Image: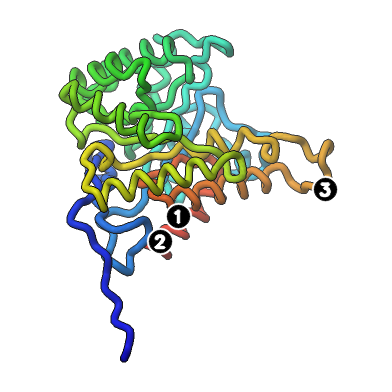
Amino acid sequence: MAFKRTPQVFSASINEVTLGTGEKAVTIGGGNTMPLYSFDAPPKHKVAIGVEITDTGVDKTLPGMAAYYEGAETLTDIAKRAAEMPGADFVVLALDGADPNGDNRPVDECIAIAKEVADAIDVPLAITGSKNVEKDTELFSKLAEALQGRNVLFVSAREENYKTIAASAVMAYGNKISAESAVDINLAKQLNVLLTQMGIQPTSFVMNVGSAAAGYGYDYVASTLDRVRDAALTQNDAMLQMPIITPVASEAWNVKESIVSEEDFPEWGSRESRGVSMEICTAASVIAGGSDAVILRHPESVKTISGMIAGLM
């Protein structure tokens, strides 16, 4: 008897969340199959790719980055070039300079930078902060007001500051937020419950369940992504049906393989090639695990991952 394959399609589905406005707005989520199971049902929306830029400029020690952004001297020029990158769906502005342990850029200056970037691009904008809870709470709250009406995604709201960020970014000014937890399904669900209890609609936020570069404790990330998607679809758990965004670039470009010089480790080859490989491997892995959007940095990584998405979805 010939094998008759039965598609596995679930009655539950991932929520749809829209970023940005106008013709180039991006919607993520909406799937009701396991990740990349396009043979069971066509995906409602493809995995989206965000291109990360920073307020500190382009890393010109990487030849490929320097070549792509050649001639882009101002942050406005850099933002435009990122928005035009083949495979890019949205731009991610990392306000690294706001870090109190670094440049400690004032909030008002960060707001001016963000408005410049938002005005320069016609694709959706996401913003990541300094990773300092106190600074980001103030920063995101004021940015949400300054960018009202643009449907910006603020990455991320954590247990320590979600009330303030959600109240300002979503409830007061109509933007979106990402709920960040530390690679634990229970913590992810708990934060989602708290946000919905505040009155935040499930279509107004996404999840950042945490990440790690491939090979750096990534098994915990893989198991968390699998468990979240399984619970969302097979158990119809409404508190885990938010789309997932994964900031890959910040992880992949901060591990030893992507940092150490070619002079120190000549047998490892090109530092840029190592970083790109780490970024591609990590992005491919989280997409296979269920991420609905990834944040990348290098043009070669964006090209490769967008090609993978096109081929598999």
Q: Earlier in the sequence, mark 1 or mark 3?
A: 3
- 173 horizontally vs 272: left or right: left
Residue beneath the point at 55% across and 29% down? 73
For residue 293, above or below residue 198? below
What separation in Å lies between label 2 and label 3 (alpha carbons)? 34 Å
Q: How is the image coloured?
A: rainbow
Q: Residue at horizontal 38%, vertical 49%?
A: 290
54 up-or-down from 1: above or below: above
- The answer to which image quadrant residue 62 occupies is top right
Q: What amino acid does circle 1 point to? A: Ser
Q: Which tag, 2 or 3, sits closer to the chain's start?
A: 3
From the viewer's perspective, is the residue at label 2 or at label 3 nearer? 3
Residue 150 in view here: no
Q: In the rendered picture of this protein, how many numbered marks are placed on residues?
A: 3
Instruction: Kindly indicate the quadrant of the structure image that contains residue 118.
Output: top left
For mark 2, give the secondary structure: helix
The tag on residue 306 is 1
Residue 71 x, y percent position in the rendering: 57, 36
In this view, the residue in front, 19 or 181, is 181
Give the labeled residue for mark 2.
310
Q: Which residue is mark 3?
A: 267
The three-letter code of the residue at mark 2 reads Ala
Query: Callout 1: 10 Å neighbours few (<14), some, many (20+)?
Result: many
Furthest-bottom residue in this view: 1
Query: x, y percentage for residue 144?
Result: 29, 19
Determine contact: label 1, label 2, CB under 8 Å: yes
Amino acid carrying mark 3 in the image: Glu
Spatial CA distance of label 1 from label 3 is 30 Å
Q: Mark 3: give few (<14), some (14-19) or many (20+) Cα within 10 Å.
A: few
